[in-house]
Amino acid sequence: MKKILSLVLALALIICCFAGCGAKKDTLTVYTEAGFAPYEFVYNNEIVGVDIEIVKAVAEKLGKELVVKDVKFDTIVGAVKSGKADIGAAGITINDERKEEVAFSIPYSSTEQYVIVKADNNTIVNLDNLKGIKIGIQNGTTSDFMIDGLIKDNTLAGSTIVPYDAPALAAAALGSKVEAVVTDKLTAQIIVDGSNGAYKTFKLVKADGSDAAEVEEYGICVSKENTELLKTINEVLQGLLDDGSVAKWEKEFNDKAATVTE
Ligand code: GLN
């Protein structure tokens, strides 16, 4: 009886090990930050969005099971670099600093920096008006880096950055802990649409009306060693750009996100 029992246990152990190993080998792990509609956000308890559709298509092409992990935005590039995550997909702007750490796909979307203020705020209308105030941003984003640079070069003398884990959390502090929030265009518009008229948004411009920030482009990142995966991502992305899927998803998830109020 004892012998049979240990045989059964041993068999069970072997089966578990195989199943475990198999599952690990066949997954594609994607790190994202699900507070960034329309690219990734929670809808009916599920993480959805443009980036999620893109990585779904990549996983399908590779015949792998997709695992999406919701993490803090400023940890994504590091996790991809170290191999903890296979892919980072989070509306990540392609820039030189990040390119030192990871490899980026072809760009699939572009954005500009937008400011959100309370709807009744008539004093903040351009970059100069952000001087001397508290500005909310999502930690580790290009909005964070840009405002930090402007404080350091004295353009925004006396301003302070208040960091949040997500742009919507920064917006929720408008009028109490911060006077303005800076984030990417579509995300800003969705937050404003969902605020029932409490906030408004505008593109970040200088006092003379010229652009205050450069146009940014989003890319999907992988570790620099992962050239095969990057090749597949680029092939899939090019197809999705050519057949209009990315543009279609931007609209679809924009509309969907507008129905979710935080
Ligand atoms: N595009 C911005 C960046 O890369 C913000 C991305 C995000 O908040 N998900 O920093």
Image: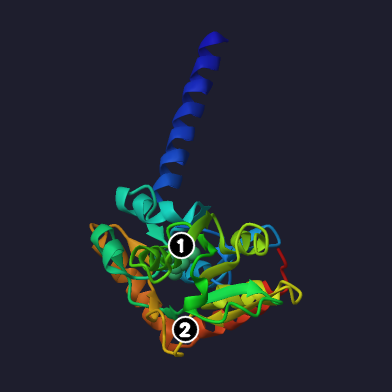
State whether residue 151 appears in this view: yes
Q: Amino acid under label 1?
A: Gly
Height in image: 76 above or below 232? above
Residue 73, x across and y down, in percent: 47, 56
Secondary element type, mark 2:
loop
| Other residues around mark 2 within 10 Å, as few (<14) / some (14–19) / many (≥20) | some
Task: Name above or below for residue 35 compared with residue 126.
Answer: above
Residue 67: assigned label: none
Q: Is residue 113 visible?
A: no
- Looking at the picture, which amino acid does disc 2 mark? Val
Image quarter hosting the N terminus: top right
Look at the picture and state if 199 lies above or below 224: below
Name which residue lies at 52% across and 70% down: 182
| Closest to the observer, 236 or 83 | 83
Which residue lies at the image location 34% right of the left edge and 70% below the top edge?
94
Residue 188, quarter of picture = bottom right
Asked if residue 117 lies left or right of residue 213, the reply is right
Q: Residue furthest right?
A: 196
Per the rendering, the mark at residue 158 is 1
Q: Which quarter of the rendered image does ligand 1 occupy?
A: bottom left
Q: Nearer the viewer, mark 2 or mark 1?
A: 1
The residue pinned by badge 2 equals: 205
Q: Earlier in the sequence, mark 2 or mark 1?
A: 1
